[in-house]
Image: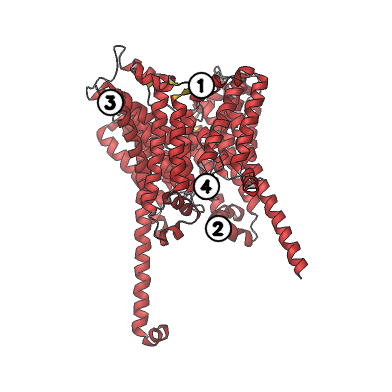
């Protein structure tokens, strides 16, 4: 239980509540259920991309191509729908492309052993280029309304996609807690060599992580198309950096092995809430990035100070114990001398 | 002497130089105007900003760090330049103020990296957003404070087209030159020479490699790790600011979003130049050659009628291919060495 209280997720969640309270004091409209629901609804895409990115960061990797995969899948979905492909089939096609894109990253990283940042930086260019080639550089507008319906479909007063995302978050959170093979992600990220010695299939685990990152970007792409109703060429642009920021903010550690889907969830909602909050306190929208970046830096700095303080405390405790032992048992001191 | 030449011919830089010559010849065979030296030199102005950011980034990558905030510092420097000029400061003094802002931004990154154990990627990701946000917000803030940063067309027009109408003498920076050599190319070469001397001829340069290979060993051998890191990130900020100034002159207007698209190309150039993302390896010559290689490739593809959409596909694929090939060659050499050692030990037995 004490672990939960010390967790970064909770810290950011409390900060989120503080943010909502303070902004609400300045502009009470922010407290309305509608505004809060709106924030949740507009953070869905980032939540999903961040969870996908989290799988990769857990293994101590990084994937900067997820934004481009989002864009590519969105384009595939848009083109397929406009070509008259049935909605379920078009969605499946878009997801297949995103999985394939993730697998290309995985092949490069696990079999060719290209460093993850290089591999995904390369495919970032490739996927974004493909997206432009497919559309000829023009936006995909006039997307059939069949898919837009889902964005406005309410179940029990809550939007359909919020339910979908919620289910995905809970499912992945349970999976990562209870499912042994999912725990491999943590083992590989924490100590790759150790994991190999323990007979954990490192390559397969890494492969799965990058493939999942692709899949989640694909799911985000479907929500993107449904919510926006068209596909601009900037779709997903810079989303990879926001996803990494959301993960880190929520407590996913870039050195691997630490983090949960809740980190991604809380981090993504927080970043989106900051954007909305600025609107409510009448700060112009172009300050969003400055505030988001400053919050990220403040969070990692705070985290560093806390970690150091905890480490110092533990060291002191150990030293105290040793001193006491020496005091009780002078013979050991003589032995040491 | 002969052994020396042979050794040099095995280096990565030599391979890049050969590739560069081949590339120019192939592109020239397809389109003869490409072989016109004057054209070739002037076409470098399209990508000098990438080199200006990539050259000092090489030093950071040698220390096993990374700085992705340079693309934001370009915009920040550009808008600083524009705003100080509008405030009535001489354009060249404004230029130095912009460069100073770049150095300060870099020092901020460096101090953060030196003071904590947080991954430089996270730190510069945070500052990437922060600097870009400040660059975007600054004109609006000044406008709200009653400082008019724009011309007769109004604030909305300014937000669209940036601060234009800069003096002709300033615009000459990107469009003028000495003889056949355009100023931006000369700036790149001087900057590269400066960084090359720092990296390869000074103790500071040796420290960079040591920090990249083993930061703990560096600390224990009394290397001033903190000040070295701050300096090297400050140099990266300076390079990005220089790139921002050159871009401002190139587009003849100061904008806060200049250089936003350059990140992929910048890192590609450094890695293609032979720097190891895990630290300890890299040269200025390598980055310089790789910059020209990628830059001319882009030019050549565009001249051949390939649309600009295809260019990132080629550059991205090239990046992956080169790194994969390099790893393969390294693994092959290692294997050969192992087999050789095995044979020798067997013979001795």
What colour scheme has been applied to the protein in the rendered image? secondary structure
Dot 4: element: helix
Left or right of B349, for residue A6: left
Instruction: From the image, tell me which residue sits under label 2.
Output: A191
Parent chain of label 3: B
User: Residue A289 location, x and y as percent?
Assistant: 38, 33
Residue behind mark 3: B84
Q: CA distance from mark 3 to mark 1?
A: 29 Å
Residue drawn 63% across the image and 19% down it: B304
Q: Earlier in the sequence, mark 2 or mark 4?
A: 4
2 and 1 marks in contact (CB < 8 Å)? no
Tag 4: Cα neighbours inside 10 Å, few (<14), some, or many (≥20)? many
Camera-nearest residue between B219 and A78: B219
Camera-side mark, 2 or 1: 1
Q: How many marks?
A: 4
Pointer 1 residue: B42
């Amino acid at each position: 239980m004490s672990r939960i209280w010390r967790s970064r997720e909770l810290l950011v969640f409390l900060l989120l509540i503080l943010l909502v309270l303070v902004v609400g004091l300045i502009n009470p409209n922010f407290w309305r259920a509608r505004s809060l629901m709106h924030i949740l609804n507009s953070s869905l895409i980032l939540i999903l991309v961040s969870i996908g990115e989290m799988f990769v960061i857990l293994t101590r990797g990084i994937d900067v191509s997820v934004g481009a995969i989002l864009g590519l899948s969105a384009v595939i979905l848009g083109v397929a729908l406009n070509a008259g492909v049935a909605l379920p089939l078009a969605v499946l096609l878009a997801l297949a492309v995103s999985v394939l894109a993730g697998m290309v990253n995985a092949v490069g990283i696990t079999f060719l052993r290209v460093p993850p940042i290089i591999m995904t930086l390369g495919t970032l260019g490739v996927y974004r280029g493909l997206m432009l080639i497919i559309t000829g550089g023009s936006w995909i507008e006039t997307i059939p309304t069949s898919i837009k319906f889902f964005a406005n479909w309410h179940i029990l007063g809550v939007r359909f996609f919020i339910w979908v995302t919620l289910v995905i978050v809970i499912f992945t959170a349970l999976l990562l807690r209870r499912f042994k093979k999912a725990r491999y992600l943590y083992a590989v990220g924490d100590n790759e060599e150790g994991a190999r010695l323990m007979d954990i299939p490192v390559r397969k685990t890494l492969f799965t992580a990058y493939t999942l990152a692709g899949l989640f970007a694909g799911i985000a792409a479907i929500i993107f198309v449904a919510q926006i109703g068209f596909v601009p060429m900037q779709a997903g642009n810079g989303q990879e950096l926001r996803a990494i920021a959301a993960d880190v903010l929520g407590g996913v550690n870039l050195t691997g092995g630490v983090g949960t889907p809740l980190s991604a969830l809380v981090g993504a909602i927080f970043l989106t809430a900051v954007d909305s909050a600025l609107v409510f306190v009448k700060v112009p929208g172009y300050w969003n990035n400055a505030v988001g970046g400053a919050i990220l830096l403040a969070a990692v700095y705070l985290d560093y100070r806390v970690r150091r303080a905890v480490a110092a405390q533990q060291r002191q405790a150990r030293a105290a114990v040793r001193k006491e032992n020496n005091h009780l048992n002078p013979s050991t001191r003589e032995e040491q001398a | 002497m002969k052994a020396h030449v042979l050794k040099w011919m095995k280096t990565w830089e030599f391979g890049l130089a050969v590739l560069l010559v081949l590339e120019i010849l192939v592109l020239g065979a397809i389109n003869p105007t490409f072989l016109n030296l004057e054209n070739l030199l002037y076409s470098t102005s399209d990508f000098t900003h990438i080199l200006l950011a990539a050259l000092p980034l090489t030093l950071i990558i040698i220390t096993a760090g990374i700085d992705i905030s340079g693309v934001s510092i370009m915009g920040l420097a550009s808008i600083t330049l524009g705003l100080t000029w509008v405030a009535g400061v001489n354009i060249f003094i404004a230029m130095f103020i912009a460069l100073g802002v770049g150095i300060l931004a870099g020092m901020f990154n460096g101090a953060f990296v030196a003071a904590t154990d947080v991954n430089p990627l996270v730190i510069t990701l945070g500052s990437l957003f922060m600097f870009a946000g400040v660059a975007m917000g600054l004109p609006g803030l000044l406008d709200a404070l009653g400082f008019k940063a724009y011309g007769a067309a109004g604030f909305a027009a300014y937000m669209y087209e940036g601060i234009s109408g800069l003096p002709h003498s300033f615009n000459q920076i990107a469009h003028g030159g000495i003889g056949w050599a355009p100023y931006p190319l000369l700036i790149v070469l001087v900057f590269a020479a400066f960084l090359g001397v720092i990296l390869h001829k000074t103790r500071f340069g040796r420290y960079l490699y040591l920090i990249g290979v083993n930061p703990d060993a560096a600390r224990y051998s009394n290397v001033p790790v903190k000040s070295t890191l701050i300096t090297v990130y400050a140099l990266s900020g300076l390079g990005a600011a220089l790139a921002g100034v050159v871009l401002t002159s190139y587009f003849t207007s100061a904008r806060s979003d200049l250089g936003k698209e350059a990140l992929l190309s910048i890192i590609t150039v450094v890695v293609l130049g032979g720097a190891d993302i895990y630290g300890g390896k890299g040269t200025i010559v390598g980055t310089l050659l790789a910059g020209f290689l990628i830059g001319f490739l882009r030019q050549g593809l565009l001249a051949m009628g390939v649309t600009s959409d295809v260019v990132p596909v080629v550059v991205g694929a090239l990046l992956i291919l080169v790194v994969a090939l390099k790893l393969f060659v390294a693994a092959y050499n290692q294997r050969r060495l192992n087999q050789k050692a095995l044979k020798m030990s067997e013979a001795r037995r």
